[in-house]
Image: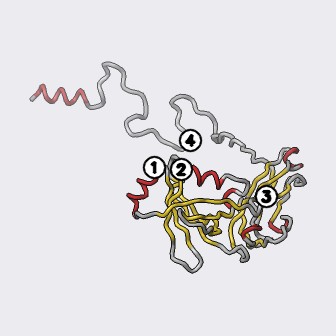
Amino acid sequence: MAGERVKLEVKEREGRGSADSRRLRSQGLVPGVLYGRGKPPHPFVVHERELRRVLSGDSGLHAILDVVLDGQGTAYPAVLKDYQQEVPSGRLAHIDLHEVRLDQTIQTQVAVELIGEPAGVKEGGVLSQVSRDLNVEALPMEIPDHLELDVSGMAIGDTLRLVDLPVQEGVTYLDDPEETVLATVTMPTVFVEPEPEEVEGEELEEGELPEGEEAPEGEEGEAPAEGEAAEGGGDEQQQQSEA
């Protein structure tokens, strides 16, 4: 839903540094900076509960925030440009807001949502979303919270690109219309287990050596029978007795 404006009340931030940021977060506050048009950055703090409320509306992260500084009546239209989260809690740790003019275009990223079930998926294909965000340019009040792409007509082997996305009045797509792939439907990948390799040659009998190989030295032939003297062994014993 484009064009949603939400009031956000913040307070001046006096401290600086990482130690001060940790202290604020322990109190349920989120430090942030409002960057103005030609004005110096303005540090502030806001209750995390209040910040989540304004960012969870229909426009989500693309809402126009009317930032009101504590004690002032002036509202500064701004958009969320960046944010940081704590790990692993996921709590917001810091935000950057940029003041905007409602009569001048801005550039931002918008999520692409696929709608419908492709015909190719019903036939066993697999739907893959390649690009999830697109760069767009529009007036702040015309930035859509998301872009819808109907994929119900996709068959196996089909590809949808940015050029296939319906044109939205007041919104300019900044990515390459022909090169930016949004979705594909492909055949599922089938894993084929390789067959075990067969050993060439005939199966050998126990103790038989492959053809062309010789037995190691000292192993060829059978061992002499028990009590049989090795050749030359008796002569050696006779020479010792004669001595």
The residue depicted at 36 percent of the width and 25 percent of the height is 224
User: Contact, CB < 8 Å: mark 1 with mark 3?
Assistant: no
Residue 190 occupies quadrant: top right
The residue depicted at 73 percent of the width and 61 percent of the height is 4
Label number found at residue 211: 4
Point out the frontmost of discs 4 and 1. 1
Q: Mark 2 points at which residue?
A: 91
Give the alpha-carbon distance from disc 4 to disc 3, as whole Å: 61 Å
Give the alpha-carbon distance from disc 4 to disc 2, as whole Å: 74 Å
Q: Name the residue under label 3.
A: 183
Q: Earlier in the sequence, mark 4 or mark 3?
A: 3
| Image coords of residue 162 (percent x, y) | 80, 66
Residue type indicated by callout 3? Ala
Quadrant of the image containing the C terminus: top left
Of residue 174 and residue 157, the one placed in the foreground of this image is: 174
Residue 195 visible to the viewer: yes
Q: Earlier in the sequence, mark 1 or mark 3?
A: 1
| Image coords of residue 117 (percent x, y) | 85, 48
Of residue 3 and residue 92, the one placed in the foreground of this image is: 3
Q: Name the residue under label 1.
A: 27
Neighbours of disc 1 within 10 Å: few (<14), some (14-19), many (20+)? few
**Mark 3: secondary structure:** strand
| Image coords of residue 188 (percent x, y) | 78, 47
Residue ranking furthest to the top: 227
**Mark 1: secondary structure:** loop
Point out the frontmost of discs 1 and 3. 1
| Image coords of residue 54 (percent x, y) | 64, 55
